[in-house]
Amino acid sequence: MKASKPREVLYFVVTKVITTQGETVYFYLVVDGYSHYMFFLGNSAELTDEAYVDHIKKLLVHKEFTSHSGNYTLVTYSRSYLVPVISDLLSPWGACVNNPGLVVQNALPDLAAALVSIRHSVAG
């Protein structure tokens, strides 16, 4: 799946982060398949189906999403059983597909680079 313009293909990524206090936090991010721009949707202490769907709902009102018109495809890498629920939420603007291979190939390198950058900036 190749994006030919911004916000045409969006990759939904959840990453687990361990804080310096040893707590687990899940970050919900979206990576634009065209520009590789990443935006943050929020975090949660637990990775539940409800939190997963709630953060996709946050995408629908996020300024980076609402500033763009046109249809898009949201690609997820886990919880394929939620695709029908997510597709219903997105139906006015696009569709949802579950394709772990596409997320790994197209979004995880951007996520890894961002996390390394954050780590270096925090470490000084």
Image: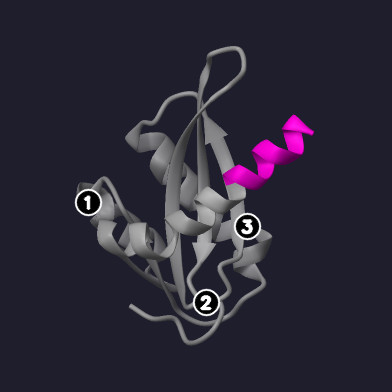
Q: Give the image quarter of residue 16.
A: top left
| Type of amino acid under label 1 | Ser
Query: Is residue 35 magenta-colored?
Result: no
Viewer can see residue 110: yes
**Residue at horizontal 67 percent and vertical 72 percent from the top:** 67
Closer to the camera in the image, 98 or 34: 34
Q: Give the image quarter of residue 86.
A: bottom left
Residue 3 drawn at (x, y percent) = 44, 81
Under circle 3, the secondary element is loop
Above or below, 124 against 40 in this view is above
Q: Which residue is mark 1?
A: 80
- Marks 2/1 in contact by CB < 8 Å: the verdict is no
Q: Which residues are magenta?
A: 115-124
Question: Tag 2 or tag 3, which sits nearer the N-term?
Answer: 2
Above or below, 24 against 106 in this view is above
Q: Which numbered tag is attached to residue 34?
A: 2
Residue 2 drawn at (x, y percent) = 38, 81
Closer to the camera in the image, 19 or 14: 19
Question: Tag 1 or tag 2, which sits nearer the N-term?
Answer: 2
Labels 3, 2: front one: 2
Q: Which residue is mark 3?
A: 62
Identity of the residue furthest to the bottom in this view: 4
